[in-house]
Amino acid sequence: MEPRMQAGAIAGEDELIASEFLTFTLGSEEYAIDILKVQEIRGYEPPTMIANAPPFIKGVINLRGIIVPIIDLRIKFNLGRVEYTPFTVVIILNVAGRVVGIVVDSVSDVVSLDTSQIRPAPDFSGSFDTRYILGLASLDSRMLIVSDIERLMTSADMELIDGAVA
């Protein structure tokens, strides 16, 4: 088994080797996340709503006896009008020992990226938060936002895990 890109690593650091990523779309952008964090992909079904949950937490589903919170990343990232289409899917993740689901517009494919294809995210001088972005990757004519999905899901602003990192 080949070495994996470490969460929080940035392209250009020592000993980063090719890794596989699941790509998906949110609005007009395409994102990539570590395939090892993905448990399964499901069609979107309305979850059971939870009172007083933030708007981006759509509710919960029962996945073979496990109660899974469902987060709509389109709402979390303020991507405008949210529509649920036949292409809308839920990616079930296993992060930090917890199972969570994220709603995305569609899943594209699985790609293999090596460090020469991943560039550090540009510095935007605090105009918005890039701590969940590992880098940007060019693949053919596509630009992928390579995201640290575990860091995002365990962050304090997701309100999913007690004692989450700010």
Image (spheres, helix red, strand yellow):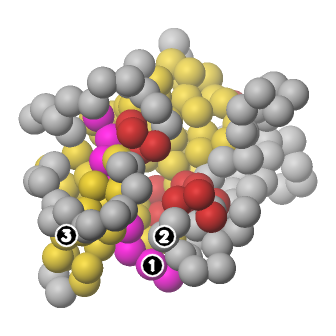
| Numbered disc 3: secondary structure | strand
The amino acid on which the numbered mark 3 sits, given as a three-letter code, is Ile
Q: In the rendered structure, which segment of residues is drawn in magenta?
A: 97-105
**Any mark on residue 61, and which?**
3
Q: Quadrant of the N terminus?
A: bottom right
Q: Quadrant of the C terminus?
A: bottom right
| Numbered disc 1: secondary structure | strand
The amino acid on which the numbered mark 2 sits, given as a three-letter code, is Leu
* Residue at (38% x, 24% y) in the render: 80
Any part of residue 52 in sight: yes
Percent of width and height locating residue 28: 41, 19
Q: For residue 105, what is the image quadrant?
A: top left
Percent of width and height locating residue 109: 35, 38
- 48 above or below 58? below
The amino acid on which the numbered mark 1 sits, given as a three-letter code, is Arg
- 40 above or below 72? below
The residue to which callout 1 is attached is: 98
